[in-house]
Amino acid sequence: KFEENARDCTFAFALFTPDDLVDKSEGRYHQARPNVMFETGWFVGRLGKERVMILLKEGTKIHSDFDGVSRVQYKEDVNDVFLQIQTELKELGVI
């Protein structure tokens, strides 16, 4: 169902929130759910890094695999960075 609907997209937003606690020998950190990271990678592969934007909630670790993907960081509410998202989309030529 994901691929069926995602095929029609020309731009993707990925909401990375600190939902999963990872406990490793190097320390503990919070990351987005694995399915969100997988689907973001799917969109990067299909659309290219320039057509994907990560909305990153403060306190969420992001893996270096997503370097080069546009991202906007926010504290509590993604609505707080609406104007920044709009500016990024204009710069990318999406709107």
Image: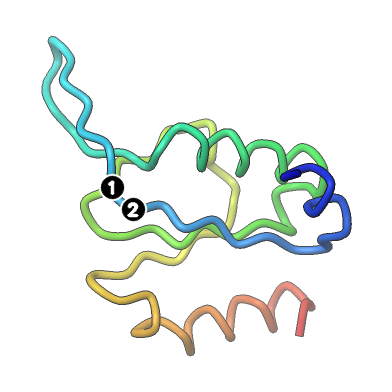
Measuring from the top left, give residue 20's x and y in whole percent: 27, 36
In this view, which residue lies farthest toward the right? 8
- Residue at point 24% right, 70% down? 75
Mark 2 highlights which residue? 17
> Which quadrant, please, contains the N terminus?
top right
Q: Name the mark nearer the viewer: 1 or 2.
A: 2
Q: Is residue 25 above or below residue 66?
A: above
Measuring from the top left, give residue 29's x and y in whole percent: 18, 33
Query: Any mark on residue 29, and which?
Result: none
Q: Secondary structure at mark 2?
A: loop
- The answer to which quarter of the image holds residue 43 is top right
- Residue at point 88% right, 59% down? 8
Q: Are marks 1 and 2 in contact (CB under 8 Å)?
A: yes
Dot placed on the residue nearer the N-terminal end, 1 or 2: 2
The 10 Å Cα crowd at callout 2, few under 14, some 14 to 19, many 20 or more, is many
- Residue at point 46% right, 85% down? 82
**What amino acid does circle 1 point to?**
Thr
